[in-house]
Image (spheres, grey):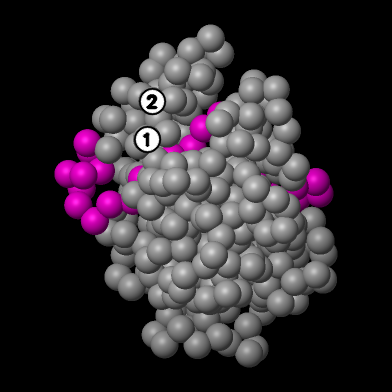
Amino acid sequence: MSNLSTSPTHLPIQPGILQTITAHGRYLSFDLKSADELHASLARLLPLVDGERVVLGFGHTLVSALDVQIPGLHDFTGIEGSRVRLPATPAALWCWLRENERTDLVHQTRRILRALLPAFELQHTVEAFRSGNGHDLTGYEDGTENPKDQAAVDAAFVQGQGEGYDGASFAAVQQWQHQFDKFEAMAELDQDNMMGRRRSDNEELDDAPVSAHVKRTAQESFNPEAFVLRRSMPWADMLNAGLHFVAFGKSFYAFEAQLRRMSGAEDKHTDALFTISKPVSGSYYWCPPMLDGKPDLRALKLA
């Protein structure tokens, strides 16, 4: 996660997607409550979205309510043939708040909620944070295989589609809840084999089993290759914790290809990660490009 290079790009992207993970994060998802108030609420929201401290995504239901289409955008509905449960929890609007001070996170949230009422209703909130140098709460480094520099840009952002589209990104979001008692009961070698890496030095295991998470998700092993830009953060509440998985791509292809293999839909082998962690949500969003410091919503017919 935080080891990602942040080289500049000519594309009008939301820069927070490429930047280093902040100390604190909050993910807000909203349902559309009143179409009559939709345009007024969005007009209040847009000045708050700089693409850096606040990354914005639109769900299929909201795009449909605006009576437009974004090529490639649809709701997450699971994976056909999956051997594990993959919950689908679509939402109309998604905000990823990124701050290094929790105080700023509190006030940013208040401003966004105030702007979106009464058209939107808060569906779900996830409190997130940086762990170490970008580690999952199991102690393993997350995002080790993230593409770097121009490869990250090529994987994560739309290009060659024209103004209002170029610089956009498709976000796949899943909240994973870890079962720490199961994980901690495993021998260290079994934990490493489950991940396909040694926790001690982050080295990949050549002899890891076929179910190892690293082998299930090796991005270069797909045809075509399935590279995503992972921007996940650990999360926790009073009783539960895990990883809030977020992957940005130029389409949903790479995410779906990896999840198809992880879930056993491709070859009947499920990812060993499912033995100690379960997804409890699943949603897709279109993250618009930027124009003059604000989200570019020309593709949504909102100048």
Magenta stretch? Answer: 79-107
Which of the 4 image quadrants contains residue 2? bottom left
Name the spot of residue 71 as percent of width and height, x first: 75, 42
Residue farthest along the left direction in this orientation: 103
Q: CA distance from mark 2 to mark 1?
A: 7 Å
Residue under label 1? 47
Horizontal relation, residue 132 to residue 49: left or right: left
The residue shown at (31%, 65%) is: 131
Decide: marks 2, 1 in contact (CB < 8 A)? Answer: yes
Q: Amino acid at mark 1?
A: Pro
Residue under label 2? 44
Name the foreground residue: 80 vs 211.
80
The residue shown at (23%, 38%) is: 106
The residue shown at (60%, 61%) is: 156
The answer to whether residue 8 is visible is yes
Name the spot of residue 73 as percent of width and height, x first: 70, 41
Name the foreground residue: 78 vs 254.
254
| Residue density around tag 2, few if under 14, some if 14–19, many if 20 or more, within 10 Å | some
